[in-house]
Image (cartoon, rainbow, N blue to C red):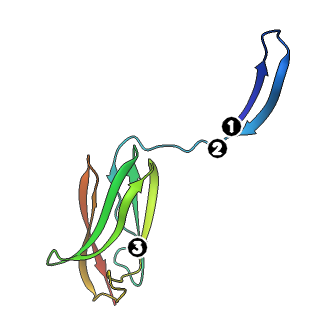
Amino acid sequence: VNLSYQFIGDDNIVLSAGSEALELTPVPKEFSLQQNYPNPFNPVTTINYDLPKDAYVNLVIYDILGREVINLVGKDMSAGYQTVIWNTRNQFGSPVAAGIYFYQIQTRDFVKTKKMVLLK
C-alpha cells in the first residue's frame, strides 16, 4: 500500500509532503496449531501456528511418556502466522530416538497438542 501525506500549516501552506510504501501483514482470526510437516519425518519437521494477537507462547515437544524433550518457543510473540523448525534434538543438543512425539502450544488463551512420528 502506498500512503501519500501532506502537513498543512494554519495558513494553508504545505509544510511537508511525501509518500511511503507500507506492507500490510494479515493477522489470523483465531489461534491454531497445524499438523507438522512432513509427518512422519526425518531429520527435521516444520510446525506452523497462528496467533490472532500478541501473546507469550510456549511450544514444547514431549516424548511418548510425557517427558519434556525441548521447549522450542518460550517468549513473547507478535500476532501473525508463525513457523518453527525442530531438528530432532533435545534441550542438550543430543539427537532423540525414533518414535512418537507430541508438541503442545500454550498461551494464556489457547492450548493445543498434536502428535508426530520421527522415523530413523
Earlier-in-chain disc, 3 versus 2: 2
Dot 1, how many residues are within 10 Å of its Cα: few (below 14), some (14-19), or many (20+)?
few
Earlier-in-chain disc, 2 versus 1: 1
Q: Nearer the viewer, mark 3 or mark 2?
A: 2
Provide the residue designation for mark 3. Answer: 38
Quadrant for residue 12, please give it: top right
Q: Are marks 2 and 1 in contact (CB under 8 Å)?
A: yes
Residue positioned most to the left: 65
Marks 2 and 1, how far apart at CA: 6 Å
Q: Which residue is drawn at the image coordinates 78% and 23% (left, top)? A: 6
Q: Position of residue 38 (x, y in %)?
A: 40, 73
For residue 27, the mark is none
Check the picture and name the quadrant holding the C terminus: bottom left
Left or right, 20 with reference to 117? right
Name the one closer to the observer, 70 or 49: 70
Left or right, 47 with reference to 60? right
Provide the residue designation for mark 1. Answer: 1
Provide the residue designation for mark 2. Answer: 23
Marks 3 and 2, how far apart at CA: 30 Å
**Kind of residue indicated by mark 1:** Val
**Kind of residue indicated by mark 2:** Glu
Name the one closer to the observer, 20 or 120: 20
**Kind of residue indicated by mark 3:** Pro
Q: Which residue is drawn at the image coordinates 28% and 52% (left, top)? A: 107
Task: Determine whether 71 is above or below 17 in the image.
Answer: below
Q: Are marks 3 and 1 in contact (CB under 8 Å)?
A: no
Check the picture and name the quadrant holding the N terminus: top right
Provide the secondary structure element on which disc 2 rests: loop
Earlier-in-chain disc, 3 versus 1: 1
Q: Which residue is drawn at the image coordinates 43% and 44% (left, top)? A: 28
